[in-house]
Amino acid sequence: MSRVYNFSAGPAVLPEEVLREAADEMLDYRGTGMSVMEMSHRSGAFESIIKGAEADLREIMGIPDQYKVLFLQGGASQQFAMIPMNLMKNRKAAYIVTGQWAKKAYQEAKLYGEAVEVASSADKTFSYIPDCSDLDIPEDADYVYICENNTIYGTKFKTLPNTKGHTLVADVSSCFLSEPVDVTKYGLIYGGVQKNIGPAGVVIVIIREDLITEDVLPGTPTMLRYKIHADNGSLYNTPPAYGIYICGKVFQWIKKKGGLPAMKEINEKKAGILYDFLDQSSLFHGTVRKEDRSLMNVPFVTGNEELDAKFVKEAKQAGFENLKGHRTVGGMRASIYNAMPVEGVEKLVEFMRKFEKEN
Ligand SMILES: *Cc1c(COP(=O)(O)O)cnc(C)c1O
C-alpha cells in the first residue's frame, strides 16, 4: 500500500488514523456484528454515533445551546436554495459575491426573491475580499450571505462583514474546523463536509433556533425545511449514516490533536511554508492579495500555461496528486486541509524548488 500526498480541493484528504479505525470497524462495529453501513439509523448503536458526533462538534466549536446542529444531504449546493426558502421572510437578501460558489448561491436566491449583490470582487477575478465595513445593505434584507473561504480562488474573510444588525449566513465548506470560530456572530453556518471533515454526502448546518420556523416560502418541500430536521434530530428520514460516522471520528481526531486552536496553529504553519516559498520564488507566484490569503486553498501559477501543465504532470509522477487549478482559473492549487500533514507541504515545496532550478 502506498498513499500519495493528496492536494485535492474536495473530496479531499482524511486523517489516516480515522481511515484505519474505520477499516478496523468495517465488518463488526464494536460487537454489533455488522458494519455501520448495514445498521438501522434507528438503532441504539447509530443513535450513540450521531449524538456523539453532535456533542463533539458542539464542544470543538463552542456551539451555544440556542443553536441547532443538523446533519443533512444535498451538498452545499442544496443550501443555496434551502437558505432563501427558509429565511427570506421579506423576500430580500444581501449577497457578497467573492467567487463562484457565492455567485451560485446568489443566482439561486434570485429564484425565490430579491437577491441584492452588495459587494463583489469579480473585477479582479475574485483575487481579493472587498471592504465590507460599510455596505449598502437594504434595511429589510432578511440576511447577509458570504462564502467565508473561497475554495477556487483561495481567499478568506479575515474579518466578517459589518452586517449592520442583519443575520449573517456563511458557507464555510472549505474552512470548517480550520480555526476557532465565534458561532454567535452568525445566524447560520453551513458546509459540505467533503472539503475538511469527512466523505461527500453530508452537509452540516448550524442554525440559531429563532431562524427555524414554520413560516417558509410557499411550496417549500418538507425535506427542505430546517424545522422538520431540527424537530427530528436529523432523523426525519434516513440520514447519510456512514458519512456522519466518519465525521464523528474526525471530530474525535481534532479533539485529540488539541481542538481548533491546535488546528489553526498547524494550518498557519503549513500555509506559511508554502506562501513564504511563493513570495521569494523566481518561477512561481501566488494569485491572491496577501492579506486575504486562505489557509486552506493556495492557488499559484508560473505565468506560463505549458510550464504549469508540466509542473502538474511531474508533480503527479513524484506522488503529489490533484495540484491542477480549478478548470475556470487554470494554474495550480494546493488544498492543504486539516488532514494534510506538515511533511506533505514541506515535501511539495522541496519539489517546487527543484522544479524551479530545472526550468
Ligand atoms: C465545494 C463547495 C461547494 C459545493 O459543494 P457541493 O457539496 O458539491 O454542493 C459550495 N461552497 C463551497 C465553498 C465549496 O468549496
Image: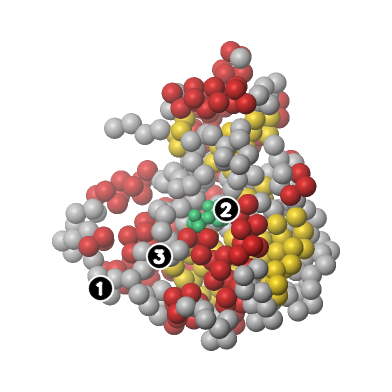
* Amino acid type indicated by mark 3: Ala
**In the rendering, which numbered label is found on residue 308?**
none
**In the rendering, which numbered label is found on residue 53?**
3
For image coordinates 57% across by 37% down, the residue present is: 325
For image coordinates 65% across by 68% down, the residue present is: 110
208 w.r.t. 332: above or below: below
Q: Nearer the viewer, residue 176 or 326?
A: 326
**In the rendering, which numbered label is found on residue 175?**
2
Q: Quadrant of the C terminus?
A: top right
Q: Horizontal and vertical percent for residue 97?
A: 70, 57
Q: Secondary structure at mark 2?
A: loop
Q: Secondary structure at mark 1?
A: loop
Front disc: 1 or 3: 1
For image coordinates 74% across by 49% down, the residue present is: 122
Q: Nearer the viewer, residue 206 or 330?
A: 330
Q: Quadrant of residue 157?
A: bottom right
**In the rendering, which numbered label is found on residue 43?**
1
**Colouring scheme, one of rainbow, by chain, secondary structure, one colour:** secondary structure
Q: Residues within 10 Å of mark 1 (few under 14, many from 20)?
A: few
